[in-house]
Image (cartoon, coloured by chain):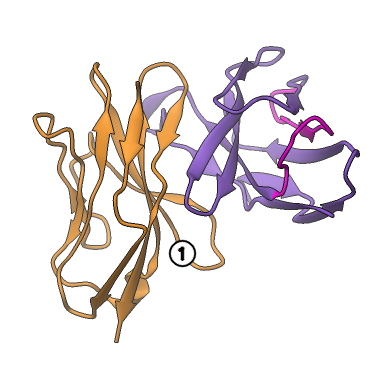
Chain colours: A orange, B purple
Amino acid sequence: AQRVTQPEKLLSVFKGAPVELKCNYSYSGSPELFWYVQYSRQRLQLLLRHISRESIKGFTADLNKGETSFHLKKPFAQEEDSAMYYCALKAGGFKTIFGAGTRLFVKA
Amino acid sequence: DGGITQSPKYLFRKEGQNVTLSCEQNLNHDAMYWYRQDPGQGLRLIYYSQIVNDFQKGDIAEGYSVSREKKESFPLTVTSAQKNPTAFYLCASTGLQNSGANVLTFGAGSRLTVL
């Protein structure tokens, strides 16, 4: 079955600390993975996708097929990073499956 | 201003009533989607449509219906058969070409409350 698991509902870190939001997926084929973010009072939007292999707002995510993971990392968290983060899997066809989301809270 | 427009933003309904949520896009995207967002459950796919006059059930289609008569529009009807309709509903779309393919663009959402 296709599934995306985000084990942490809430992650709280201090400003300047490293942050890692975990994401594991279950899919037998070749996946396409994304991180979407929802800032307060804003629309859900794409943060980054694994095929782009880019850093957005200091965040990176590496696809690890052996561990079926796509963890989101940032070396130094900022207060403006506080938001809801969703890991998503596009597993063929037109369906995108989302994890339950992790709320990141960056404390001053 | 290109994007996806959902209306109404807030909607209250009595039990037993059907309601229709509007979703319009001016992005010339072919595929459109309806998701339901509940706390702690993430986004769950209700229905999606790849082209006009065609749509498929998602993971939680029971109690919902859709139509796709125009490329720009993908309205969702929440029927009285939906057992737990109070939720936040998100409409999204994707293009089929180039770098935008597979990337979802979302509307601002509609919050439905059943009284």
* A12 in magenta: no
Q: Position of residue A42 (x, y in %)?
A: 54, 62
Q: Residues within 10 Å of mark 1 (few under 14, many from 20)?
A: some
Q: Residue furthest front?
A: B83
Quick check: B24 left or right of A82?
right
Q: Residue sitting at 26 percent across and 56 percent down?
A: A56
SS at badge 1: loop
Q: Residue sitting at 46 percent across and 24 percent down?
A: A95
Q: Quadrant of the C terminus of chain B?
A: bottom right
Give the overall secondary structure of the magenta segment. Answer: loop
Q: Position of residue A26 (x, y in %)?
A: 27, 28
User: A48 or B95: which is nearer to us?
Assistant: A48
From the viewer's perspective, is residue A73 above or below residue B96?
below
From the viewer's perspective, is residue B103 above or below residue B47?
below
| Span of residues in magenta | B70-86
Chain to which the residue tagged by mark 1 belongs? A
Q: Residue sitting at 23 percent across and 80 percent down?
A: A14
Q: Quadrant of residue A70?
A: top left
Q: Residue furthest bottom?
A: A108
User: A28 or B27: which is nearer to us?
Assistant: A28
Q: Position of residue B38 (x, y in %)?
A: 56, 49
Q: Quadrant of residue A77?
A: bottom left
From the viewer's perspective, is residue B43 above or below residue B10?
above
Quick check: B45 left or right of B109?
left
Task: Name the residue carrying label 1.
Answer: A39
User: A79 or A8: which is nearer to us?
Assistant: A8
